[in-house]
Image (cartoon, rainbow, N blue to C red):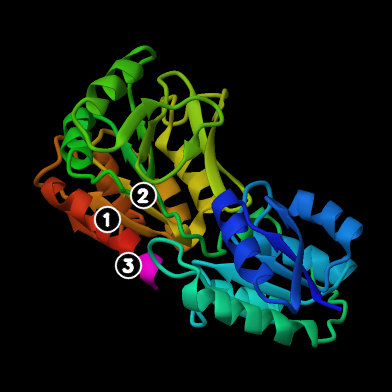
């Protein structure tokens, strides 16, 4: 009897490639392909696969959380396949701890079947011979999930007085592939949309005034609307923003602290935070929350700030790991994001 395999990956292209590659081996039968863990659960019940291949980054539920659920209720050999899972990465360790029998890394750049197809077929055959037992591991909450590794990093920036010029300086230097970015600039309602639209004409990245539910993705910058707080949320391994009402903080709405607290909670070490020129203390407590959650942090230096109130408060409370002149802020943010992605 052939080894029955179920493929779980949110990319339709990857599902087709893996189906074609594994089906070429006469000892393997691909019985289904699911775009997310919820569909996978039903297909497991319907097709009773011998082996599951599982991506890590998926909408609605990330692969490692699904793996923990699976090992508690319906254990079977799982091969984790992801761009994150080089053997030295934290995601590889987390996948193996959760019950995966093997991890296989997707190649960088364009997805090629070649050597990967042969390796994956061999791994699937090996996995099918492993007896998997139930694991009574607890499923982590959102705070623990925030510390899990993701490919996409999040840049979070706060600014106030002098921030329009400072943000323009920073965002003009971002390449089209810059990490997903969320920004609070203290500004009245109706002004933030025109500010975002104007910057969108000048920058390589897409800039827009945030709408509720907007995804935070590479190449996109979301600016919080005036008169509304913005918070980061996470669904599986994907990030998005939500717009919320509520009282002012530091006499501001949107408030930098409100955004930064949510970034610390939902992105943790996957984030980099920056506070630019501005009056007052908004952002200092939030940046410290981010730092304590594992994020890298920086502030604009005093010399290039119009007002060094907000950045200065971040230095006073220990939230800022470094001070950077405005002309180097973009470079430093991108360097830190790249450094963490490669770690």
Q: Nearer the viewer, residue 148 or 143?
A: 148
SS class of the residue under badge 1? helix
Q: Earlier in the sequence, mark 2 or mark 1?
A: 2
Q: Earlier in the sequence, mark 1 or mark 3?
A: 1
Q: Position of residue 169 (x, y in %)?
A: 15, 38
Label 1, label 3: how many angstroms apart (C-alpha)? 8 Å
Q: Which residue is mark 1?
A: 334
- Mark 2–mark 1 CB contact (< 8 Å): yes
Q: Which residues are magenta?
A: 339-343
Q: Residue at x 39, y 73 (%)?
A: 343
Does 331 appear above or below 170? below
Count residues near mark 1 (Cα–Cα under 10 Å), then give few for <14, some for 14-19, many for 20+.
Answer: some
User: Residue 298, how many percent across, how many down?
Assistant: 28, 55
- Indicate yes or no whether the magenta region holds residue 157: no
**Residue that appears at 79% across and 68% down:** 138
Q: Which residue is mark 2?
A: 179
In whole angstroms, how far apart are the C-alphas of marks 2 and 3?
12 Å
Label placed on residue 339 = 3
**Which residue occupies the foreground of this view, 303 or 105?**
105
Tag 2: Cα neighbours inside 10 Å, few (<14), some, or many (≥20)? many
Quadrant location of residue 15? bottom right
Q: In this view of the protein, can residue 93 be seen by the observer?
A: no
Identify the main secondary structure in magenta. Answer: helix
- Could you say whether the residue bearing mark 3 is in a helix, strand or loop? helix
Relative to 75, 220 lies left or right: left
Q: Left or right: where does residue 213 sit relative to residue 269?
A: right
Residue shown at 34% from the left, 57% from the top:
297
In the shown orientation, is residue 234 left or right of residue 300?
right
């Amino acid at each position: 009897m052939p080894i029955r395999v179920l493929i779980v990956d949110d990319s339709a292209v990857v599902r087709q490639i893996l189906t074609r590659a594994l089906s070429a081996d006469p000892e393997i039968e691909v019985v289904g392909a699911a775009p997310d863990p919820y569909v996978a659960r039903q297909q497991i019940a319907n097709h009773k696969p011998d082996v599951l291949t599982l991506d890590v980054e998926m909408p609605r539920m990330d692969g490692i959380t699904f793996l923990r659920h699976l090992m508690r209720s319906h254990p079977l050999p799982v091969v984790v396949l992801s761009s994150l899972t080089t053997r030295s990465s934290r995601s590889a360790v987390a996948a193996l701890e959760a019950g995966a029998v093997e991890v296989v890394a997707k190649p960088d750049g364009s997805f090629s079947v070649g050597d990967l197809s042969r390796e994956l077929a061999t791994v699937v055959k090996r996995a099918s011979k492993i007896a998997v037992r139930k694991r009574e591991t607890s499923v982590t909450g959102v705070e623990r999930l925030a510390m899990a590794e993701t490919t996409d990093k999040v840049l979070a920036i706060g600014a106030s007085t002098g921030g329009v010029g400072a943000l323009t300086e920073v965002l003009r230097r971002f390449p089209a592939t810059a990490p997903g970015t969320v920004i609070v600039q203290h500004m009245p309602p109706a002004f933030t949309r025109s500010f975002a639209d104007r910057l969108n004409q000048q920058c390589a990245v897409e800039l827009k005034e945030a709408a509720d539910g907007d995804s935070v993705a590479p190449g996109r910058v979301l600016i919080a609307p005036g008169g509304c707080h913005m918070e980061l949320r996470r669904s599986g391994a994907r990030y998005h923003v939500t717009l919320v009402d509520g009282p002012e903080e530091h006499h501001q709405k949107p408030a930098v602290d409100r955004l930064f607290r949510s970034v610390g909670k939902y992105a943790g070490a996957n984030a980099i935070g920056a506070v630019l020129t501005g009056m007052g203390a908004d952002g200092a407590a939030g940046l410290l929350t981010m730092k304590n959650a594992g994020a890298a942090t920086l502030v604009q230096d005093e010399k290039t700030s119009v007002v060094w109130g907000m950045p200065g408060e971040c230095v006073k409370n220990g939230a800022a790991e470094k001070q950077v002149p405005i002309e180097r802020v973009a470079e430093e943010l991108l360097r830190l994001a790249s450094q963490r992605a490669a770690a």
